[in-house]
Image (tube, rainbow, N blue to C red):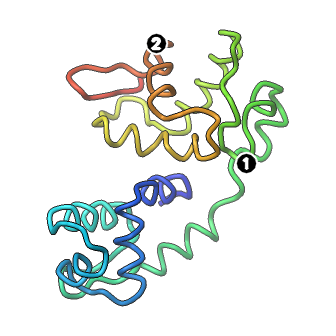
């Protein structure tokens, strides 16, 4: 798991609430649903996504935070994009600590920034459902420099991502 994947997994409010309930000792979907006041289906989906992301381990009734995985993320991650924005004035201007400050108005600069985001968020040839694309783009928009829907639209407009029947792919 990368720091970016961690941020994406916790970008959704319901998943953060579910994760918090597990951190505070809930070990089953029923306990979580009672604590966070969410429907059972939303809890089960959230637990599955947190498990897929490597944040939670165990089966229903034995759910726990995967502390080893979290430690590995902290240990293995360096601050995002430390050297690269310094090397490129466009990235240095429009990114702060790996988060989008604003979108450039000039198409050439916007293309440089969007290429950077696409390369770090999506693997070439991998197919992503819209929800996964949104989860990957939300951390880039954490400071309100733009929103993930606009970012997704620009990535498609610039042909950095393709979209077909709700499935996205970086070429």
Residue 131: percent from left, percent from top:
32, 41
The relative height of residue 122 versus residue 107 in the rendered view (above or below) is below
Figure quadrant of the C terminus: top left
State the count of labels. 2
Residue 157: percent from left, percent from top:
46, 12
Res 97 label: 1
Res 157 label: 2
Distance of label 1 from label 2 (alpha carbons): 26 Å
Residue 5: percent from left, percent from top:
47, 54
Q: Secondary structure at mark 1?
A: loop
The residue carrying pointer 1 sits among few (fewer than 14), some (14 to 19) or many (20 or more) residues within 10 Å by Cα, namely few
The residue at the point 67 percent across, 20 percent down is 112
Quadrant hosting residue 106: top right
Viewer-side residue, 22 vs 122? 22
Quadrant hosting residue 55: bottom left
The residue at the point 21 percent across, 83 percent down is 28
Q: Is residue 84 left or right of residue 119?
A: right
Residue 96: percent from left, percent from top:
75, 43
Q: Is residue 86 left or right of residue 36?
A: right
The residue carrying pointer 2 sits among few (fewer than 14), some (14 to 19) or many (20 or more) residues within 10 Å by Cα, namely few
Q: Is residue 105 left or right of residue 124?
A: right
């Amino acid at each position: 798991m990368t720091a970016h994947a961690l941020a994406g997994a916790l970008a959704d409010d319901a998943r953060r609430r579910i994760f918090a309930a597990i951190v505070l000792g809930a070990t089953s979907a029923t306990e979580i649903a009672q604590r966070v006041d969410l429907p059972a289906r939303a809890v089960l989906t959230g637990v599955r996504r947190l498990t897929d992301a490597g944040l939670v381990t165990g089966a229903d009734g034995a759910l726990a935070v995967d502390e080893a995985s979290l430690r590995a993320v902290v240990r293995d991650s360096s601050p995002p994009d430390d050297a690269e924005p310094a090397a490129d004035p466009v990235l240095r201007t429009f990114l702060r600590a790996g988060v989008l400050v604003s979108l450039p108005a000039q198409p050439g600069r916007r293309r440089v920034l969007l290429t950077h985001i696409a390369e770090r968020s999506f693997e070439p040839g991998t197919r992503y459902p819209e929800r996964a694309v949104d989860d990957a783009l939300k951390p880039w928009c954490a400071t309100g420099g733009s929103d993930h829907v606009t970012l997704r639209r620009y990535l498609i407009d610039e042909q950095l991502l393709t979209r077909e029947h709700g499935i996205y792919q970086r070429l």
